[in-house]
Image (cartoon, rainbow, N blue to C red):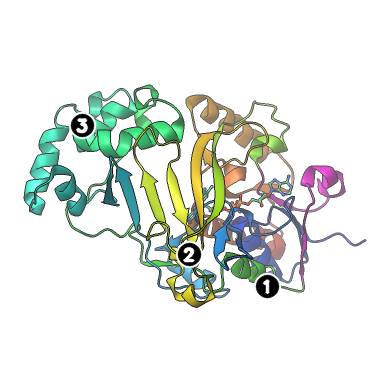
Amino acid sequence: TQQPDLVIVGAGLFGLTIAERCAEELGLRVLILERRHHLGGNAYSEFDPETGVEVHKYGAHLFHTSNERVWQYANRFTSFTDYKHRVFGKYQGQVYSLPMNLGLINQFFGKSHTPDEARALIAEQSSEIATEDASNLEEKAISLIGRPLYEAFIKGYTAKQWQTDPTELSAEIITRLPVRYTFQNGWFSDTYEGLPVDGYTAWLTKMADHPNIEVRLETDFFAVADDYKGKVPIVYTGPVDEYFGNSEGRLSWRTVDLEESVVDTGDFQGTGVVNYNDQEVPYTRIIEFKHFHPEREKTHLPGKSVIVHEYSRFAEEGDEPYYPVNTADDRAKLLKYRELAKSEPMVLFGGRLGTYKYLDMHMAIGAALSMYDNKLKPHFTEGAELT
Ligand code: FDA
């Protein structure tokens, strides 16, 4: 059979963006290899057959961006609803509106504050430790927002996320802990925000819907690598350490266990995401998917809802890698992998797994558009070398 012009490993947003651009704009024949049974990477979702609720299978995905080009690009494949994401947090029997804002401060301290009074209060409480003296995450957080807010809203949640006491975590993990001295409680502050009207899978499928793109599912690149390595250009979006047989050691990741259930109530928690800040509660969050799409109310089965409890932990071999842990040791390994990657002929590494970076969806699309502009297009149109 005829070789494709380009092989892409991974049908996530990064790989799909590269594929779409190369097929549509350059007329290349693109083969995408995907080891899962579906395309879309971690943004993939399914409509639950019983309740009609769209469930994001790899954790809640909310689209937001301030990048005009990425927004225009995404809108070629889907329209977006006007959903605005909000997050609430439970702590000791009360529900607070996050991120930390004037409403939360007033409720937590049991008294109304003007913005200036709240600012003065937090400044005084955070003066206990100077930020530059902080030697661990706990001290850093206290130096930014003071001990009371830290103990309620950061300590337990962070300990559960990392399965590590915050005094044992590096101060570097947090750079800022934004506190808003207004009642504005939108979770994102980007220009554009919304959810794909017909769901994520419809959007992602449309990106690959081109006569020059073939998506081969349930195909692990490593099983067929000899057919393509060194023979055709490859864009690899799988884990960079795995590509090199973990020769420099494994990069460490956190994963999330997602426990999905259908509950016998039409409304379990009144909103999409509730964080659980108490350390004794074993899960970090509960997602209730129907609230992401209030406009679909008529298509949802009454009296039932789909919820997911999330539990965070370090990823073991075989777990889905979700968030890079990024210790000093990981960074040293990554530098070695980057050197190896540079000298790998005709292979470009991209996406969150290929670069060992947490990327939001809009960042994955943006990075793929840049790789297309700066590397693939010059290679295929002017014969520039692929490095
Ligand atoms: P992605 O991981 O999606 O795709 C890589 C693909 O490569 C996978 O399908 C994998 O199976 C495949 N692959 C790997 N190795 C292979 C091999 N050897 N052979 C064949 N295929 C192989 N973003 C956002 O904007 N808003 C949000 O709310 C969220 N929420 C969120 C929650 C959680 C829990 C996570 C982990 C992530 C998010 N994200 C997010 C981020 C979003 O998921 C991310 O931006 C995209 O998945 C990035 O797309 P990639 O294509 O880089 O990777």
Looking at the image, is 311 positioned above or below residue 247? Answer: below
Labels 3 and 2 touching (C-beta < 8 A): no
Q: Which x, y percent locates residue 176?
A: 29, 41
Question: Which amino acid type is shown beneath numbered disc 1?
Answer: Glu
* Residue at the disc numbered 2: 290
Residue furthest out toward the right: 1
Q: Is residue 9 left or right of residue 309?
A: right
- Marks 3, 1: nearer the viewer: 3
* Residue at the disc numbered 3: 147
The one nearer the camera, 293 or 269, is 269
Is residue 175 highlighted in magenta? no
Looking at the image, is 11 positioned above or below residue 148? Answer: below
Residue 135 seen: yes
Is residue 221 highlighted in magenta? yes
Residue at 38% x, 35% y: name it. Answer: 158
Q: CA distance from mark 3 to mark 2?
A: 36 Å
Q: CA distance from mark 3 to mark 1?
A: 54 Å
| Residue 24, label in figure | 1
Question: Which amino acid type is shown beneath numbered disc 2?
Answer: Lys
Residue 166 lies in quadrant: top left
The one nearer the camera, 87 or 131, is 87
Classify mark 2: helix, strand or loop.
helix
- Which portion, as a residue range, is magenta? 212-238
Residue 173 seen: no
The one nearer the camera, 191 or 347, is 191
Question: Mark 2 or mark 3, which is nearer the start of the sequence?
Answer: 3
- Marks 2, 1: nearer the viewer: 2
The one nearer the camera, 30 or 161, is 161
Question: Which amino acid type is shown beneath numbered disc 3?
Answer: Arg
Residue 90 lies in quadrant: top left
Residue at 82% x, 61% y: name it. Answer: 4
Classify mark 3: helix, strand or loop.
helix
